[in-house]
Amino acid sequence: MPIFRAMRPRDLLCPKPAGLYCPPGDFYIDPVRPVARALITHGHSDHARAGHGHVLATGQTLDIMALRYGDDFAGDTQPIAYGETVTVNGVSVTFHPAGHVLGSAQIAVEHGGTRIVASGDYKRMPDATCAPFEPVRCDVFITEATFGLPVFRHPDDRAEIGRLLKSVAQFPERSHMVGAYALGKAQRVMRLIRDAGYDRPLYIHGALETLSAYYQEQGVDLGELRPATLGKGAKAEFAGAIVIGTPSAFADRWARRFPDPVSCFASGWMRIRQRARQRGVELPLIISDHSDWDELTDTIRETGASEVWVTHGREEALVRWCELAGIRAKALHLVGYEDEGD
């Protein structure tokens, strides 16, 4: 009888200059340049780019790409639901929740008896603004490693918001300016503030309006949001207010118009005090949309993968942890992925 041999993982997915490529399926996952067929894990701009011939992604990710790039961001698009399997040139592809932002997904690729799961960006902490991460058993797990060092252990995000609201109560004459990335982090911060019982209006920078409105349309209750615009003589109206904007907005003259603002920034990088000082952050909020060290290592164990490929982040430390745990591992050294959703 002939002996069945499973496809070698490197023949199913392999790194190319344009990104992670599947030769038998002839598609890329999160390519960094325009390609004929792209599978997109989520809507952050370092993973979701315009100009592809065909895009397969969750409906919410496709909506977000259209909001960011315009309706003609790709030649054609195909929505896929969580848990749904489609066949691409004989390769089975299934999308599973990643818990990163609204619509984010891991992508399971299966062919020839081998299953590889590409995580995209993911987090394990509960988040009311997106579907929770779902561990998927696989032969090879491709994991991000944005915070892949033991020093990164994220605190409870509710406690971080508690620190923000305590400061708001302590300094009623000052506005609190919270820097947060436009997709995912800003809406998560808004929802955490609401869940903590804060029911006053939140003021948002114009760059957050479209995506925040989309989250609301998708059933994520963010409460009353108002434009953070200052008319003549309106500075005093923002005393005691919480104003949320993109990090770039806080380097602009716009932020200096508010009354004695307390500068806050919601990011996993706020664990590093030097980063907070460099940004001039008075109240760092350690809130990340990526997994920390313990969550990364726990997830690897949960997948049951016998091999792990590590990408974009602190690759070497996680590869070493895998080796010590008896798991084959290597760094992919993919380029073009930043920390937009940190």
Image (cartoon, helix red, strand yellow):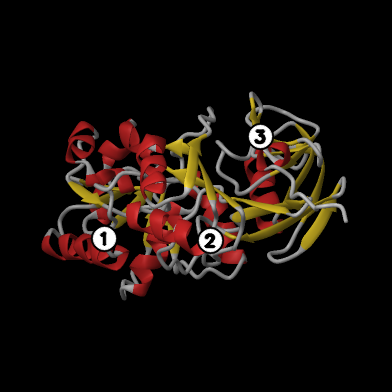
Farthest front residue in view = 1
**Residue drawn at (55%, 52%) of the image:** 211
Could you say which disc has been placed on residue 304 in the image? Answer: 2
Residue under circle 1?
Answer: 155
Q: Secondary structure at mark 2?
A: loop
Say left or right for 297 vs 309. Answer: left
Few, some or many C-alpha atoms within 10 Å of disc 1 (few <14, some 14-19, many ≥20)?
some
Say left or right for 294 vs 175. Answer: right
Which is more N-terminal, label 1 or label 2? 1
Q: Secondary structure at mark 1?
A: loop
The residue mark sitting in front, 2 or 1, is: 2
Type of the residue with mark 3: Cys
Residue under circle 3?
Answer: 14
Type of the residue with mark 2: Gly
Few, some or many C-alpha atoms within 10 Å of disc 2 (few <14, some 14-19, many ≥20)?
some
Q: CA distance from mark 2 to mark 1?
A: 27 Å
The residue mark sitting in front, 2 or 3, is: 2
